[in-house]
Amino acid sequence: MTEHDGTSGPAAFDPVSFLESLAAFETHERVDDAREYLVETVDEHAASGVAASVDDAGNVLATTGDPSAGAHVVLNTHVDTVPPDVPFERDGDVLRGRGTCDAGGPLAALLAGFLAVDRTVASRDDDAVSGAVTLAVTPDEETLSEGAHHLVTAGGTDAAPAPVAAIEDADAFVVGEPTGLAACTAAKGRFQGTLTLAGENAHAAEPASGTNAVAALEDALGGVRAFDDRADAPPVHDRLGAATLTPTVVDGGTATNQVPASASVVLDRRSVPPETADGFRDALLAQVREAVPGDVGVEFAFTERETPFLEAWATDETAPVVDALVDAGAAPPRPFGAATEASYFAALAPTVVFGPGVLADDDGAVAHSPREYVRATDVERGATVVADALHSLLD
Protein backbone atom coordinates (compact mmCIF):
# COMPACT_ATOMS: atom_id res chain seq x y z
CA MET A 1 0.00 0.00 0.00
CA THR A 2 0.96 3.63 -0.48
CA GLU A 3 2.36 5.02 2.78
CA HIS A 4 0.84 8.18 4.18
CA ASP A 5 2.04 10.35 7.02
CA GLY A 6 1.09 9.02 10.43
CA THR A 7 2.31 8.52 13.94
CA SER A 8 4.06 5.58 15.47
CA GLY A 9 1.81 3.36 17.55
CA PRO A 10 -0.44 0.60 16.26
CA ALA A 11 1.18 -1.86 13.89
CA ALA A 12 0.63 -1.33 10.17
CA PHE A 13 -2.54 -3.02 8.94
CA ASP A 14 -2.15 -5.92 6.48
CA PRO A 15 -5.40 -6.36 4.52
CA VAL A 16 -4.48 -9.84 3.28
CA SER A 17 -3.70 -11.15 6.76
CA PHE A 18 -6.97 -9.65 7.96
CA LEU A 19 -8.86 -11.42 5.16
CA GLU A 20 -7.19 -14.75 5.95
CA SER A 21 -8.41 -14.51 9.54
CA LEU A 22 -11.85 -13.23 8.60
CA ALA A 23 -12.44 -16.02 6.08
CA ALA A 24 -11.91 -18.63 8.78
CA PHE A 25 -15.20 -17.61 10.42
CA GLU A 26 -18.45 -19.20 9.29
CA THR A 27 -20.71 -16.30 8.35
CA HIS A 28 -23.50 -17.93 6.35
CA GLU A 29 -25.75 -18.48 9.39
CA ARG A 30 -24.49 -15.99 11.98
CA VAL A 31 -21.96 -13.17 11.89
CA ASP A 32 -21.26 -12.62 15.59
CA ASP A 33 -17.69 -13.94 15.62
CA ALA A 34 -16.64 -12.22 12.40
CA ARG A 35 -18.24 -8.97 13.53
CA GLU A 36 -16.42 -9.14 16.87
CA TYR A 37 -13.17 -9.72 15.04
CA LEU A 38 -13.82 -6.68 12.86
CA VAL A 39 -14.49 -4.49 15.91
CA GLU A 40 -11.33 -5.77 17.62
CA THR A 41 -9.30 -5.09 14.47
CA VAL A 42 -10.49 -1.48 14.23
CA ASP A 43 -9.78 -0.90 17.92
CA GLU A 44 -6.34 -2.53 17.67
CA HIS A 45 -5.15 -0.68 14.56
CA ALA A 46 -6.79 2.74 14.90
CA ALA A 47 -4.10 5.28 15.75
CA SER A 48 -6.33 8.22 16.66
CA GLY A 49 -8.25 6.63 19.52
CA VAL A 50 -11.21 5.68 17.31
CA ALA A 51 -13.30 2.83 18.68
CA ALA A 52 -15.77 0.77 16.68
CA SER A 53 -19.30 0.21 17.94
CA VAL A 54 -22.20 -2.09 17.05
CA ASP A 55 -25.63 -0.48 16.74
CA ASP A 56 -29.06 -1.96 17.43
CA ALA A 57 -29.29 -3.39 13.91
CA GLY A 58 -25.91 -5.13 14.11
CA ASN A 59 -23.98 -2.62 12.01
CA VAL A 60 -20.32 -1.97 12.83
CA LEU A 61 -19.66 1.78 12.86
CA ALA A 62 -16.49 3.83 13.25
CA THR A 63 -15.62 7.39 12.21
CA THR A 64 -12.22 9.03 11.94
CA GLY A 65 -11.74 12.75 11.37
CA ASP A 66 -14.25 15.58 11.67
CA PRO A 67 -17.34 15.42 9.40
CA SER A 68 -17.94 19.14 9.89
CA ALA A 69 -14.47 20.08 8.63
CA GLY A 70 -14.82 18.92 5.03
CA ALA A 71 -15.98 16.02 2.90
CA HIS A 72 -17.49 13.01 4.65
CA VAL A 73 -17.02 9.67 2.87
CA VAL A 74 -18.82 6.54 4.06
CA LEU A 75 -17.31 3.13 3.36
CA ASN A 76 -19.92 0.37 3.37
CA THR A 77 -19.89 -3.35 2.80
CA HIS A 78 -21.22 -6.47 4.52
CA VAL A 79 -19.82 -9.24 6.69
CA ASP A 80 -22.40 -11.98 5.98
CA THR A 81 -22.17 -14.63 3.26
CA VAL A 82 -24.47 -17.09 1.50
CA PRO A 83 -24.72 -20.80 2.39
CA PRO A 84 -23.26 -23.31 2.35
CA ASP A 85 -19.94 -22.58 4.00
CA VAL A 86 -16.82 -23.21 1.88
CA PRO A 87 -13.68 -23.68 4.04
CA PHE A 88 -10.83 -21.24 3.57
CA GLU A 89 -7.55 -22.21 1.95
CA ARG A 90 -4.69 -20.31 0.35
CA ASP A 91 -2.77 -21.36 -2.74
CA GLY A 92 -0.07 -18.80 -3.45
CA ASP A 93 -1.75 -15.59 -4.55
CA VAL A 94 -5.23 -17.15 -4.50
CA LEU A 95 -7.41 -17.06 -1.38
CA ARG A 96 -10.31 -19.51 -1.68
CA GLY A 97 -13.41 -19.96 0.43
CA ARG A 98 -16.82 -18.54 1.18
CA GLY A 99 -16.60 -14.80 1.71
CA THR A 100 -13.12 -14.28 0.29
CA CYS A 101 -14.62 -12.52 -2.72
CA ASP A 102 -18.08 -11.49 -1.52
CA ALA A 103 -17.34 -9.47 0.42
CA GLY A 104 -14.26 -10.18 2.57
CA GLY A 105 -11.78 -8.93 -0.01
CA PRO A 106 -13.67 -5.64 -0.52
CA LEU A 107 -14.03 -5.26 3.27
CA ALA A 108 -10.28 -5.70 3.73
CA ALA A 109 -9.59 -3.03 1.10
CA LEU A 110 -12.07 -0.56 2.59
CA LEU A 111 -10.79 -1.14 6.11
CA ALA A 112 -7.23 -0.54 4.93
CA GLY A 113 -8.31 2.79 3.42
CA PHE A 114 -10.13 3.76 6.61
CA LEU A 115 -7.09 2.99 8.76
CA ALA A 116 -4.76 4.82 6.37
CA VAL A 117 -6.82 7.99 6.80
CA ASP A 118 -6.96 7.38 10.55
CA ARG A 119 -3.15 7.32 10.73
CA THR A 120 -3.11 10.68 8.96
CA VAL A 121 -5.69 12.04 11.41
CA ALA A 122 -3.52 10.81 14.28
CA SER A 123 -0.54 12.72 12.91
CA ARG A 124 -2.26 15.86 14.32
CA ASP A 125 -1.39 17.79 11.20
CA ASP A 126 -4.29 20.25 10.90
CA ASP A 127 -3.90 20.36 7.13
CA ALA A 128 -3.59 16.60 6.65
CA VAL A 129 -7.30 15.72 6.54
CA SER A 130 -10.24 18.05 5.90
CA GLY A 131 -13.24 15.90 6.67
CA ALA A 132 -13.96 12.39 7.83
CA VAL A 133 -14.37 8.75 6.85
CA THR A 134 -16.99 6.48 8.37
CA LEU A 135 -16.84 2.71 8.20
CA ALA A 136 -20.35 1.19 8.14
CA VAL A 137 -20.39 -2.61 7.82
CA THR A 138 -23.79 -4.31 7.69
CA PRO A 139 -24.69 -7.82 8.92
CA ASP A 140 -27.32 -9.09 6.46
CA GLU A 141 -26.85 -7.80 2.92
CA GLU A 142 -27.35 -11.29 1.50
CA THR A 143 -30.84 -11.60 3.02
CA LEU A 144 -33.07 -8.68 4.07
CA SER A 145 -30.63 -5.74 4.41
CA GLU A 146 -32.15 -4.76 7.74
CA GLY A 147 -28.81 -3.25 8.81
CA ALA A 148 -28.57 -0.96 5.79
CA HIS A 149 -32.23 -0.03 6.05
CA HIS A 150 -31.64 0.97 9.67
CA LEU A 151 -28.76 3.20 8.60
CA VAL A 152 -30.87 5.17 6.14
CA THR A 153 -34.12 5.40 8.14
CA ALA A 154 -33.64 5.05 11.89
CA GLY A 155 -32.40 8.59 12.41
CA GLY A 156 -35.95 9.85 11.93
CA THR A 157 -39.43 8.54 12.68
CA ASP A 158 -41.77 6.07 11.01
CA ALA A 159 -43.53 9.02 9.41
CA ALA A 160 -40.32 10.78 8.38
CA PRO A 161 -37.39 8.35 8.08
CA ALA A 162 -33.89 9.86 8.01
CA PRO A 163 -30.31 8.58 8.04
CA VAL A 164 -28.70 7.84 11.40
CA ALA A 165 -26.22 10.40 12.72
CA ALA A 166 -23.17 8.42 11.59
CA ILE A 167 -24.03 8.88 7.89
CA GLU A 168 -26.56 11.72 7.78
CA ASP A 169 -24.14 14.25 6.29
CA ALA A 170 -22.33 11.89 3.93
CA ASP A 171 -20.99 13.44 0.72
CA ALA A 172 -20.19 10.11 -0.93
CA PHE A 173 -20.47 6.36 -0.40
CA VAL A 174 -18.06 3.65 -1.52
CA VAL A 175 -19.75 0.24 -1.33
CA GLY A 176 -17.45 -2.75 -1.27
CA GLU A 177 -18.33 -5.55 -3.69
CA PRO A 178 -16.29 -7.66 -6.15
CA THR A 179 -16.08 -5.37 -9.19
CA GLY A 180 -12.71 -6.43 -10.57
CA LEU A 181 -11.36 -3.12 -9.20
CA ALA A 182 -13.66 -1.10 -11.47
CA ALA A 183 -15.52 1.97 -10.24
CA CYS A 184 -19.11 0.84 -10.79
CA THR A 185 -21.57 3.71 -10.96
CA ALA A 186 -24.93 2.05 -11.67
CA ALA A 187 -26.86 -1.17 -11.11
CA LYS A 188 -30.25 -2.60 -11.92
CA GLY A 189 -32.75 -3.09 -9.15
CA ARG A 190 -34.57 -6.32 -8.35
CA PHE A 191 -38.23 -6.74 -7.49
CA GLN A 192 -40.02 -10.06 -7.02
CA GLY A 193 -43.69 -10.76 -6.59
CA THR A 194 -46.59 -13.00 -7.49
CA LEU A 195 -49.24 -12.21 -10.09
CA THR A 196 -52.50 -14.00 -9.19
CA LEU A 197 -55.51 -14.51 -11.46
CA ALA A 198 -58.91 -15.31 -9.96
CA GLY A 199 -61.65 -17.20 -11.83
CA GLU A 200 -64.56 -19.46 -10.84
CA ASN A 201 -64.64 -23.22 -10.36
CA ALA A 202 -66.84 -25.39 -12.56
CA HIS A 203 -67.03 -28.96 -13.76
CA ALA A 204 -64.58 -29.55 -16.60
CA ALA A 205 -67.43 -31.12 -18.58
CA GLU A 206 -69.13 -27.69 -18.63
CA PRO A 207 -66.14 -25.31 -18.94
CA ALA A 208 -68.24 -22.36 -20.08
CA SER A 209 -70.06 -22.36 -16.72
CA GLY A 210 -66.88 -21.29 -14.93
CA THR A 211 -63.98 -18.88 -15.41
CA ASN A 212 -60.71 -20.63 -16.13
CA ALA A 213 -57.83 -18.83 -14.37
CA VAL A 214 -55.19 -21.15 -15.84
CA ALA A 215 -56.41 -20.45 -19.37
CA ALA A 216 -56.29 -16.73 -18.60
CA LEU A 217 -52.57 -17.10 -17.88
CA GLU A 218 -52.00 -17.21 -21.64
CA ASP A 219 -53.30 -13.66 -21.99
CA ALA A 220 -51.60 -12.53 -18.80
CA LEU A 221 -48.22 -13.80 -19.95
CA GLY A 222 -48.76 -12.05 -23.26
CA GLY A 223 -49.17 -8.84 -21.30
CA VAL A 224 -46.01 -9.64 -19.34
CA ARG A 225 -44.04 -10.19 -22.55
CA ALA A 226 -45.21 -6.85 -23.91
CA PHE A 227 -44.76 -5.00 -20.62
CA ASP A 228 -41.71 -3.03 -21.72
CA ASP A 229 -43.18 -2.22 -25.12
CA ARG A 230 -45.86 0.04 -23.63
CA ALA A 231 -45.71 3.77 -24.30
CA ASP A 232 -44.78 4.73 -20.73
CA ALA A 233 -42.16 1.99 -20.22
CA PRO A 234 -38.76 3.02 -18.83
CA PRO A 235 -36.41 3.85 -21.71
CA VAL A 236 -33.34 1.72 -22.32
CA HIS A 237 -30.78 3.04 -19.86
CA ASP A 238 -27.57 4.40 -21.39
CA ARG A 239 -25.43 2.37 -18.99
CA LEU A 240 -27.64 -0.48 -17.75
CA GLY A 241 -29.50 -1.35 -20.90
CA ALA A 242 -33.12 -2.50 -20.87
CA ALA A 243 -35.16 -3.63 -17.90
CA THR A 244 -36.25 -7.29 -17.90
CA LEU A 245 -39.37 -9.06 -16.63
CA THR A 246 -39.13 -12.83 -16.32
CA PRO A 247 -41.80 -15.38 -15.29
CA THR A 248 -40.11 -17.95 -13.05
CA VAL A 249 -42.65 -20.15 -11.19
CA VAL A 250 -46.24 -21.05 -12.17
CA ASP A 251 -48.99 -22.61 -10.04
CA GLY A 252 -52.68 -23.23 -10.69
CA GLY A 253 -55.63 -25.55 -10.32
CA THR A 254 -56.48 -28.14 -7.67
CA ALA A 255 -58.26 -30.98 -9.50
CA THR A 256 -57.79 -32.50 -12.95
CA ASN A 257 -61.54 -32.50 -13.71
CA GLN A 258 -62.31 -28.99 -12.50
CA VAL A 259 -62.13 -25.56 -14.12
CA PRO A 260 -59.42 -23.85 -12.01
CA ALA A 261 -60.43 -20.77 -10.03
CA SER A 262 -56.88 -19.62 -9.34
CA ALA A 263 -53.54 -19.39 -11.11
CA SER A 264 -50.36 -17.56 -10.21
CA VAL A 265 -46.97 -16.77 -11.66
CA VAL A 266 -43.90 -15.44 -9.86
CA LEU A 267 -42.22 -12.58 -11.71
CA ASP A 268 -38.61 -11.42 -11.45
CA ARG A 269 -38.10 -7.77 -12.40
CA ARG A 270 -34.66 -6.27 -13.06
CA SER A 271 -35.35 -2.55 -13.18
CA VAL A 272 -33.52 0.49 -14.50
CA PRO A 273 -33.84 4.11 -13.38
CA PRO A 274 -36.19 5.85 -12.87
CA GLU A 275 -38.55 2.91 -12.22
CA THR A 276 -39.56 2.33 -8.60
CA ALA A 277 -41.16 -0.70 -6.98
CA ASP A 278 -44.52 1.06 -6.61
CA GLY A 279 -44.40 2.34 -10.17
CA PHE A 280 -43.65 -1.13 -11.48
CA ARG A 281 -46.53 -2.71 -9.56
CA ASP A 282 -49.07 -0.13 -10.73
CA ALA A 283 -47.99 -0.40 -14.37
CA LEU A 284 -47.99 -4.21 -14.27
CA LEU A 285 -51.52 -4.38 -12.85
CA ALA A 286 -52.79 -2.01 -15.53
CA GLN A 287 -51.06 -4.00 -18.29
CA VAL A 288 -52.38 -7.39 -17.18
CA ARG A 289 -55.85 -6.05 -16.39
CA GLU A 290 -56.12 -4.90 -19.99
CA ALA A 291 -54.80 -8.20 -21.35
CA VAL A 292 -57.08 -10.69 -19.55
CA PRO A 293 -60.89 -11.13 -19.79
CA GLY A 294 -62.95 -8.82 -17.64
CA ASP A 295 -64.36 -11.64 -15.49
CA VAL A 296 -60.85 -12.63 -14.32
CA GLY A 297 -59.59 -11.01 -11.14
CA VAL A 298 -56.02 -9.66 -11.14
CA GLU A 299 -53.79 -9.09 -8.12
CA PHE A 300 -50.06 -8.59 -7.67
CA ALA A 301 -48.19 -8.82 -4.35
CA PHE A 302 -44.49 -8.31 -3.76
CA THR A 303 -42.73 -11.12 -1.96
CA GLU A 304 -43.02 -10.30 1.71
CA ARG A 305 -39.99 -8.71 3.34
CA GLU A 306 -39.43 -6.23 6.17
CA THR A 307 -37.26 -3.89 4.12
CA PRO A 308 -37.65 -2.22 0.70
CA PHE A 309 -36.44 -4.01 -2.40
CA LEU A 310 -33.09 -2.94 -3.81
CA GLU A 311 -34.03 -0.48 -6.53
CA ALA A 312 -32.06 0.62 -9.58
CA TRP A 313 -29.62 3.49 -9.14
CA ALA A 314 -27.06 5.47 -11.10
CA THR A 315 -24.38 7.97 -10.06
CA ASP A 316 -23.09 10.77 -12.27
CA GLU A 317 -19.77 9.55 -13.64
CA THR A 318 -18.29 13.02 -13.13
CA ALA A 319 -18.91 12.95 -9.35
CA PRO A 320 -15.77 13.67 -7.29
CA VAL A 321 -15.81 10.21 -5.68
CA VAL A 322 -15.74 8.59 -9.13
CA ASP A 323 -12.86 10.78 -10.29
CA ALA A 324 -10.92 10.12 -7.08
CA LEU A 325 -11.16 6.35 -7.43
CA VAL A 326 -10.28 6.35 -11.14
CA ASP A 327 -7.37 8.75 -10.58
CA ALA A 328 -6.14 6.42 -7.82
CA GLY A 329 -6.10 3.46 -10.21
CA ALA A 330 -9.62 2.02 -10.35
CA ALA A 331 -10.74 0.73 -13.74
CA PRO A 332 -13.07 3.12 -15.64
CA PRO A 333 -16.74 3.40 -14.64
CA ARG A 334 -19.15 0.65 -15.65
CA PRO A 335 -22.37 -0.87 -14.30
CA PHE A 336 -22.31 -3.53 -11.57
CA GLY A 337 -23.96 -6.82 -12.37
CA ALA A 338 -25.83 -7.48 -9.12
CA ALA A 339 -28.23 -5.68 -6.79
CA THR A 340 -26.52 -4.36 -3.65
CA GLU A 341 -27.13 -2.13 -0.64
CA ALA A 342 -25.74 0.70 -2.75
CA SER A 343 -29.40 1.05 -3.75
CA TYR A 344 -30.21 2.46 -0.31
CA PHE A 345 -27.26 4.85 -0.16
CA ALA A 346 -27.41 6.24 -3.70
CA ALA A 347 -30.51 8.20 -2.76
CA LEU A 348 -28.44 10.10 -0.16
CA ALA A 349 -25.20 10.94 -2.01
CA PRO A 350 -23.08 9.90 -5.01
CA THR A 351 -22.31 6.19 -4.65
CA VAL A 352 -19.70 3.92 -6.23
CA VAL A 353 -19.39 0.14 -5.91
CA PHE A 354 -15.75 -0.97 -5.83
CA GLY A 355 -13.56 -3.83 -4.70
CA PRO A 356 -11.27 -6.73 -5.55
CA GLY A 357 -12.67 -10.00 -6.85
CA VAL A 358 -15.19 -10.79 -9.57
CA LEU A 359 -18.73 -12.16 -9.72
CA ALA A 360 -17.65 -14.59 -12.45
CA ASP A 361 -14.59 -15.41 -14.55
CA ASP A 362 -13.96 -17.28 -17.79
CA ASP A 363 -14.53 -20.60 -16.01
CA GLY A 364 -17.89 -19.69 -14.51
CA ALA A 365 -19.35 -18.35 -11.29
CA VAL A 366 -17.01 -17.09 -8.55
CA ALA A 367 -19.07 -15.21 -5.97
CA HIS A 368 -21.75 -17.35 -4.27
CA SER A 369 -20.16 -20.49 -5.72
CA PRO A 370 -18.06 -23.39 -4.36
CA ARG A 371 -15.01 -22.00 -6.19
CA GLU A 372 -15.19 -18.53 -4.63
CA TYR A 373 -11.80 -16.85 -4.51
CA VAL A 374 -9.95 -13.54 -4.59
CA ARG A 375 -6.33 -12.75 -5.40
CA ALA A 376 -4.17 -11.33 -2.63
CA THR A 377 -2.50 -8.91 -5.04
CA ASP A 378 -5.94 -7.55 -6.00
CA VAL A 379 -6.84 -7.04 -2.34
CA GLU A 380 -3.60 -5.11 -1.84
CA ARG A 381 -4.19 -3.09 -4.99
CA GLY A 382 -7.75 -2.33 -3.92
CA ALA A 383 -6.51 -1.16 -0.53
CA THR A 384 -4.07 1.23 -2.18
CA VAL A 385 -6.75 2.63 -4.49
CA VAL A 386 -9.17 3.24 -1.61
CA ALA A 387 -6.51 4.89 0.58
CA ASP A 388 -5.26 7.16 -2.19
CA ALA A 389 -8.80 8.11 -3.26
CA LEU A 390 -9.80 8.97 0.30
CA HIS A 391 -6.75 11.16 0.83
CA SER A 392 -7.54 12.95 -2.44
CA LEU A 393 -11.15 13.56 -1.39
CA LEU A 394 -10.12 14.79 2.06
CA ASP A 395 -7.21 17.03 1.04
Image: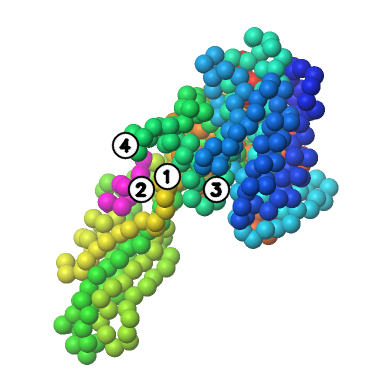
Residues at discs 3 and 1 in contact (Cβ within 8 Å): no
Please name the amino acid that badge 3 sits on: Asp
In the image, farthest residue toward the top:
126
Foreground mark, 3 or 1, reads: 3
- Earlier in the chain: of badge 1 and badge 2, it is 2
- Earlier in the chain: of badge 4 and badge 3, it is 3
- Residue at 64% from the left image edge and 9% from the top image edge: 127
Above or below 112: residue 261: below
Q: CA distance from mark 1 to mark 2?
A: 7 Å
- The residue tagged 2 is 277
Q: Is residue 364 left or right of residue 228?
A: right
Above or below 191: residue 159: above
- The residue tagged 1 is 311
Residues at discs 1 and 2 in contact (Cβ within 8 Å): yes
Which mark, residue 159? 4
Residues at discs 4 and 3 in contact (Cβ within 8 Å): no
Is residue 125 among what the camera can see?
yes
